[in-house]
Image (cartoon, rainbow, N blue to C red):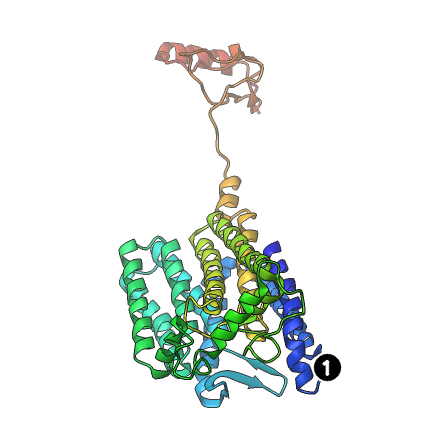
Amino acid sequence: MLSVLALVLFGLVMVYSTSSVNAISEGGVGYKYIIRQLAYVALGVILALVVYRGIPYYAWRYKPLWIAWGVSMVLLALVPLIGTENYGAKRWLGIGEVLTIQPSEFVKISLLLFTAKVIDSMRAGDVERRAAAIQIVLCVVLPALFLYKTQSDLGTTAIIAVGVVAVLWLGDIPLKVVFAILAAGVAMVVFSIVGTDYRSGRMVFLDPWNDGADGYGDGYNIIRSYYAIAEGGVLGAGLGNSHEKYQYLFASESDFIYAIIAEELGLIGALAIIALFLVFLVSGLRIAAGAPDDLGRMIAGGCTIMIVFQAFLNIGCVIGVFPTTGKPLPFVSMGGSSMMSSMIMVGLILSVAKGAGETSVYERRREDLRVIRAHEPYASAAPAQRGQSFRPQAYDPRVRAPYASPSQAPSARPYSTKQRDAYARSTYRSVPRR
């Protein structure tokens, strides 16, 4: 997927452009954060290669899935207990003093894989519909609700919901069921926004200048994002020439990096990012359409739709179409957990593409069967005319080889008992005893 490579390289350039200001203001060198981001990219590539080369996609039906699901659930449970808090939310786990991970980024992958596995087992007849529904509720829905309740992370919960709905759709679940689940998810999002004070405050994106503080309250960051996009125009202010990244726009290197892209590279650069994600979407769905089985189709399609949905959710928040959710732009924004989880999903998609080019176990078994096919008995014989019958290859029992000429072969037309006996006497009369 060249689109992923282009997005990652694009992101590294923009992360350096935006993060160098913060690094220098902290008294460090300008390349402090880009070195860290390069390490995250390298680790993400390694994880993607392990998933792509080391774990066949159909192995997620078995033990690897339970290991991934179990580890992600343990990490999810540890966040409320020993997690670290940033920007008013406890969503991270610190590993030493160097690495900080966000478990929800990996939980969404395990829940998508588990949903695909359950639907695949149901379609194969291994699990009844009621048992499949119970498994999805217990192992997918409840962890997602636990994530939302303990971490107050509506954005990741919505991304998980979209991924699960995509798997159900690709798994040929009846559309009325898919739409019912989708409607329930939308109702939950609306209730979560209206019923929570700080989330209802984010609805100020509809009119950020009227936030009760003359644009310096909840609407401040979206206003600065508007300024960045407006200053970029069509061609942009030039790479590195952003004004808003000088600590005017909060999270300019992560959640709002798209605004800096629009400011420095203009409308052309902003549309280029959208085009690359659309190319990724088409490529991923093509891989899903060519998958060898239902499980591969659900994994490739679900991962593709989940990544692209998160990308357009981020872009929508930056341009003021959606309220701020705090979700990064995949492959582009600074952040280790987002980069690694996105790369793992790319590895899953590529593993399905790899499996599509391999001979399945069923095809190998079919090729090993020795089947007698009906065809013309002799290569030198004239093509059959309309009305003449074909017959299988005729073998001479005396030498266990095809007859030398058509005249020696038994007739394919019906014959009487007398004719059959006469042919048998003439055929076996000269056969020597062995």
Helix, strand or loop at disc 1?
loop
**Where residue 357 sits: x, y (%)?**
56, 47
**Where residue 103 sits: x, y (%)?**
49, 77
**Where residue 23 sits: x, y (%)?**
67, 82
Quadrant of image for the N terminus: bottom right
For this orientation, the residue located farthest to the front is: 214
In this image, 96 relative to 377: left or right?
A: right
| In the depicted structure, whether residue 333 falls above or below residue 367 | below
Q: Please tell me how crowded label 1 is: few (under 14), some (14-19), or many (20+) other residues with Cα within 10 Å.
A: few
Q: In terms of depth relative to the viewer, which is nearer, 399 or 152?
A: 152
Q: In terms of depth relative to the viewer, which is nearer, 204 or 408?
A: 204
| In the depicted structure, whether residue 140 falls above or below residue 122 | below
Do we see residue 33 in this rendering?
no
Q: Residue at x 41, y 73 (%)?
A: 205
**Where residue 367 sits: x, y (%)?**
52, 40
Q: Residue at x 27, y 63 (%)?
A: 130
Amino acid carrying mark 1 in the image: Val
Do we see residue 93 in this rendering?
yes
For this orientation, the residue located farthest to the right is: 29
In this image, 395 relative to 389: left or right?
A: right
In the rendered image, which quarter is residue 389 located in? top left
Q: Residue at x 63, y 84 (%)?
A: 98
Task: Read off the residue under disc 1.
Answer: 29
Q: In terms of depth relative to the viewer, which is nearer, 203 or 139?
A: 203
Number of numbered markers: 1
Quadrant of image for the C terminus: top right
